[in-house]
Each structure stands twice: as structure tokens, then as C-alpha cells.
Amino acid sequence: MENVIEIKNVTKNYSDFKLDNININIKKGFITGFIGPNGAGKSTTIKLIMNLIRKDSGLINIFGLDNTNHDREIKSRIGFVYDECCFYENLKIISNEKVISAFYKDWDHKKFISYLKRFELNPNKRVKRLSKGMKTKFAIAIALSHNADLLIMDEPTAGLDPIFRRELLDILYDLIQDENKSIFFSTHITSDLDKIADYITFINKGQIVFSKSTDVINDNYKIIKGNKELLSEIDKQYIIGINKNRYGFDALTTNSSKLIEKYQDSICIENANLEDIMVYYIKKGEL
Ligand SMILES: Nc1ncnc2c1ncn2[C@@H]1O[C@H](COP(=O)(O)OP(=O)(O)OP(=O)(O)O)[C@@H](O)[C@H]1O
């Protein structure tokens, strides 16, 4: 399967943080969600992909091209949404379009106007007068209006109301039906990813915990529950993280079949969602 982004052995050092020799492959034609707790390194990774900061070592290829040597060419094919997007605050939305559209050879004015209507954004409003959510909608409208092959978004749904969030997920889902388009976005709202992501990359403390398809995740990650007696007995090699409570424990495992075989009726099993997986990996608990 073709990769649209390849991150190979990339390291970035800050005074009290290290993005530590990370490797990520983002598949062409799919939606990949990027998850991890605050300060895990998501924005740093995205800034490195977008060549906004300099890496200390490693390689980043986008569309098969080195992202530092082919900066302009690559960026013209990416729709990018992030918090510190640099629009012209004093200009109206429609005047921003005139400036920004010049950067993209495939700019589609009609599409942009239709997104403004759909997102209920007044083209004559100055950017500085937009609310946080409206600014994000404006950034999304821009990102969607130049026929980009790849959408990269850093927490695009933060600050959006649930109705628009749903609409955005529908737009992203429709977009990906064209198998040549790819989407990579970070979010803390893991339920959004439960709905639409094909792959998940999970980062913690500057290291990649895993990159897996959502099918593999759904099939393999389970929450098991048992009582206090079982807690002392259970084979800890099959447990990723554990949460003890008054009655016993619940724990994350990728080996539920082994545990069922061993403990049969003493445990009960539930599916784990992405939030469970993140929480149990990070708060591993005392095994
Ligand atoms: N310019 C910088 N100088 C020094 N440290 C930085 C700089 N930018 C980011 N960091 C540090 O890098 C670490 C990772 O930050 P990053 O913004 O990548 O995390 P994140 O996963 O996006 O977090 P969040 O979910 O809170 O947005 C943090 O400890 C942060 O303080």
C-alpha cells in the first residue's frame, strides 16, 4: 500500500522534550487519526511534516518527495488546518481569499463560496471579528478549496460545536471516497476517530506507541473485568494497563482469548474504545 507521508527515524530535541527517533507511515487513500495526551508531541510532529520547524535528524517524505527540498510543491498539494494559522486578521474573509488563493494553482473560488455558505460564514466579516470556532471553519473552508491531495489538521474539531463537528466528519468521509485523497489529523476527541478513522497512530512522551488499523484495534484490544481474588492470580504478561477498584479490577489486554482460556467464567470481556486504550496505556497502574 502506498504511503503519502513517511517519517523515518525523526528526532527533535527541545530543552525538556524529545521527539525520539519516530517512524510513521501514513497510507494514501485513508483517514489516519493522531492521538496522544497533552504534550505528547503531536503538534511538534505535524509542524515537522509541514516543514515549519527543523528536525535534528531523520527524513520526512511527502508524496515521495523530501519535505525540505520540495517545500512549495508539497504545500500546494496540502490542505492545512492548525491553531496558529496566519490569516490577515484585518482583512475580510473574501479579501483573505484573494491573497491566499494566489498560492494554489488549483484554487476553486466556487467551492470556497459554497463552503462559506455551508459553514454560515459571512464573506464580508473581518477575520479578527470571527469567533474561535468560526476561524476554524474558515481555515477548513480554505483547506478544502484547492483540491488538495492531503489534508493535515492539528485538532480541527477543538472548539467546534457538536453539530458542525458531525458535519465536518461527514465532509471528511465524503472526501476520502476519492481514493487518491488522504487525511491525517490529531484530536483529543477520540469518539470522532471511532466514527471515521481507518488507522490510528498513538504517540506518548515523544515516542510512537503504535500505528494500527482501526479493524486490528477493534479486534484485539479488550477490557477485562474480574474480582479481587482474580487480581492476585491473573497472568500479568497479558495485561497492558490496570485499574483497581473496590470490587476488583478492570484491565486492558490484547490477549483476551488466552485469558478466557485460562480464567473462563471468572472474567468478563468488553470492547475497548480509543479513549480506554489511551487511558490504560498512559496510566498503566501497578501490575
Ligand atoms: N518551541 C518550543 N520550545 C521548547 N519546547 C517546546 C516548543 N514547542 C513545543 N515544545 C514542547 O514539546 C512538547 C510537545 O509539545 P506538542 O505541542 O508537540 O504536544 P501535543 O501532543 O501537541 O500536546 P497538546 O495535545 O497539549 O496540544 C511539550 O513539552 C512542549 O512544551
Image: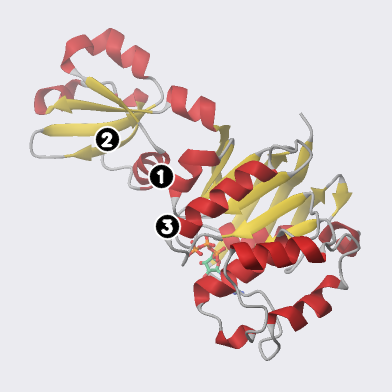
- Residue beneath disc 3: 162
Whether the residue under disc 3 has CB within 8 Å of ligand 1: no
Residue 106 bears which disc, if any?
A: none
- Residue beneath disc 2: 287
Mark 2 vs mark 1, foreground winner is: 1
Please state, as top left, top right, bottom left or bottom right, where the N terminus lies in the image.
top right
Instruction: Determine the residue located farthest toward the bottom in the rendered image.
Output: 90
Examine the rendered structure and indicate whether residue 163 appears above or below residue 2.
below
Picture coordinates of residue 173, whole percent (x, y): 61, 42
Disc on the earlier residue, 1 or 3:
3
Q: CA distance from mark 2 to mark 1?
A: 17 Å
- Residue beneath disc 1: 278
Q: CA distance from mark 2 to mark 3?
A: 38 Å
Residue at 59% of width from left, 67% of height from top? Answer: 137
Q: Amino acid at mark 3?
A: Pro
Picture coordinates of residue 140, whole percent (x, y): 64, 63
Residue at 72% of width from left, 47% of height from top? Answer: 9
Disc on the earlier residue, 2 or 1:
1
Nearer the observer, 69 or 150: 150
121 sits to left or right of 263: right
Mark 2 vs mark 3, foreground winner is: 3
